[in-house]
Structures are given as structure tokens and as C-alpha cells.
Amino acid sequence: MKAKSPPPPALPQRLSLVAQTVQSLRESIRTGHWRKHLPPERELCELLQVSRPTLRVALEELQRKGWLEVTQRQRRRIKPRRTAPGASAGKRVIAVISPYSFLTLSPQVAFLADALRERLTKAGSAVEYHVNPACFSTKPVRALEKLVSQNPAVAWLVMGAKEPMLRWFISQQLPCLVVGSCPTSVVLPSVDADHQAACRHAGGVLLRKGHRRIALVLPQGGYGGDADSEQGMRESLKDRPEAHLRVLSHDGTTAHLCALLDAAMRSPNPPTAYVVARVMPVLTVMMHLMRRGKRIPQDVAVISRDDDPFLQSTTPDVTRYAISPAQLARRVALAARQLAKTDTLEPKAIRLMAKYLPGETV
């Protein structure tokens, strides 16, 4: 009788987002991160960077498998479980801090956050996402002390931090990686697009098109990448004494940005070109200029320093600079893994060159 052939090896499978959420919750429960009850759903969504429908499916799966039970007050109680002999001590936690809710992130940043979590989870780390605007204020010490004391982590990833926050991490000698650019006075490892090179190139593009009065639109707040952008623009104009750069620093509101634009247009030498940092202000600038009767690009040019998928649907097509979110996620994940493994990382700035996408607004 012919012997049966052994079954072929099972094909590797890519875990779904629900499966990854189940895995992350189960690991945190098993290692004692939560001892009696899970936090509310909204807090878990922020922490795990998942939508509420995804979270609920994952919670139902854990309830079916006996990890959780729902109390009369609709709280999810962690059921006691016996630890098997030789169980591992759990994964290393890498904490991500952001001033913005995961539910309000732009598609580009949301993709970066999701890709980071996937890469770091595969590398054996647990990723926790903390939304805490107070950590990004001018006086962040109390908020940072509370966050760090309540959430032990082997490494901290900071999404676009400001100087007071970064100086606190340095003073506490905590392993920290900045996803963004540091101010020149702060020395920490960071990964970001090369905004200085992009704006230097943008200045050259506008000069070749005959523009000599250029406005650079930046948010207030002193993020390192915005200082690099201004430096790049000034470098492009330094050998052209007839060229003038006006910096418009807005507070993030539409009303303030429109008021700055109106003041610039009323000046004796109004700008003929605008280079705009961040994606949403690009739409505000273009729509307000057109509302004031300016044709783009016949009367005024607009360049976006940053990219977003929805800019592909605008008309005219916006001239802009883009980096691959997947490439950025790879570089950040690699640096984060090294930081978590060794507790140290060379304090250098990793800069990714953005691709110039010539559109119809110049």
C-alpha cells in the first residue's frame, strides 16, 4: 500500500487588521498592561490606531475565546487566566505620541501610522499610540511626566515635536525618535522629508518662471521642518537681490490665514507666488486667491510643500512635492527597532528627498 505523502506546508498568511488588533489586545492583557477592565472603546481606538468597527469585532473575538466578559455596566472585564509555565515576558512596547487624534489624521499620516504599527509588530514589538496635545504645549513637563510614568516603554516615537518637549526627553535620558524635524538647537535622531531641499528647489522653479515676490505660508509654533523650509527658500533667493520673500505665519485658522493673504495682496508689492506648508492651507490659499479675482497660475502661482491623495482631484492640478509614505515608514521603523533594541541611536537627521510633481499652478 502506497504511503501517504505528508501534507504541504501551510502558506504564510497576512494578518488582517482585526487579527492584529486581537493579537495586540491579547498581548497587553497577558503581560498585565490592563489588570481588571479594558479602557473605554474611544480610548482603545486612539491607543491602537483602529476604527471603532474594527475594535468591536476584535473585542467580540476575545470575548468568544474567554479573555473578556461584559459586566452589567457594559464594561469589559478581563477574565482571570492561568499563566502557562515558561510563558514569555511579553513584547517590548514602543510608544507613539501625537497631538492629533488618529480619527482626524490625514490619509498620508494615517497610512504612515498603520504601516509603522505593522512593521514594528512583525519585528516583535507592541505599539501604543497616545494622543496628548498637552505634551506639545510650551509647558509640557507635567503632561509628559504623567504619560511616561503610566505607560512604560522601551522607546518613544514623537510625531512632529516642539522644542520644550524634546528638551524634556533629553533631560530624562529617555530613548526618543522624532518623526519630523528637530529645531536646530535640539540634537535628537529624526526622520523626515528634506523640506529645506524642497523649498530651495521651489524657489528656483519660481525664479525661472519670472517670480520675484514670493510668500512662504507656514503655521505658527516652531516645528523644525518649517524652519528648514524658510532656510531653503532664503538659500534659493540669496543671490537675487531683486527677489523678496514674505513669510506668512498663521495660527491654523482659516480666518487668520485669509486675513494674512488680504494684507499681503493690499501691500505695495504683493506676492506673485505662494509656497505653502501643510496640505489643508493650500486649499485655503487657492480658494481665497480665486475669490479675490486672482487666476492661477496666470496671475499668481501656488506650490504645495507637501502632498496628499486628495490633491490629485483638484483642478487646477497642484504643483507639489511628495515622498513615499511606505519609504518613510521603513526608515522610521528601522530606526525605532534599533532604538528599542539598544536604547541608543546616533542623533542624526535622516532626510528623504521629495519628488517634484509639476502641476498646473505654476
Image (cartoon, rainbow, N blue to C red):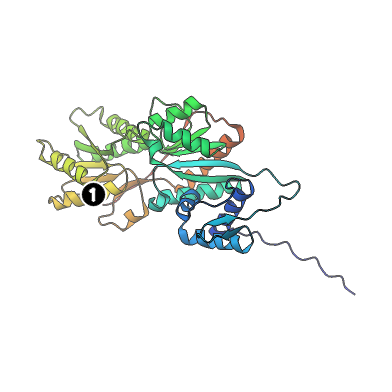
Mark 1 is on which residue type? Thr
Classify residue 210 by image quadrant. top left
Of residues 16 and 267, the one drawn nearer to the viewer in this rendering: 16
Q: Position of residue 60 (x, y in %)?
A: 56, 63
**Which residue corresponds to mark 1?**
284
Q: Residue at x 74, y 64 (%)?
A: 8
Q: Residue furthest right?
A: 1
Q: Residue at x 36, y 51 (%)?
A: 308
Of residues 347 and 136, the one drawn nearer to the viewer in this rendering: 136
Q: Position of residue 121 (x, y in %)?
A: 58, 48
SS at badge 1: helix
Q: Is residue 6 left or right of residue 1?
A: left
Q: Residue furthest bottom?
A: 1
Can residue 351 be seen here? The reply is: no
Q: Residue at x 26, y 27 (%)?
A: 238
Quadrant including the N terminus:
bottom right
Q: Residues within 10 Å of mark 1 (few under 14, many from 20)?
A: some
Q: Position of residue 233 (x, y in %)?
A: 29, 33
Q: Position of residue 313 (x, y in %)?
A: 31, 58
Q: Residue furthest front?
A: 72
Q: Is residue 118 above or below residue 99?
A: below
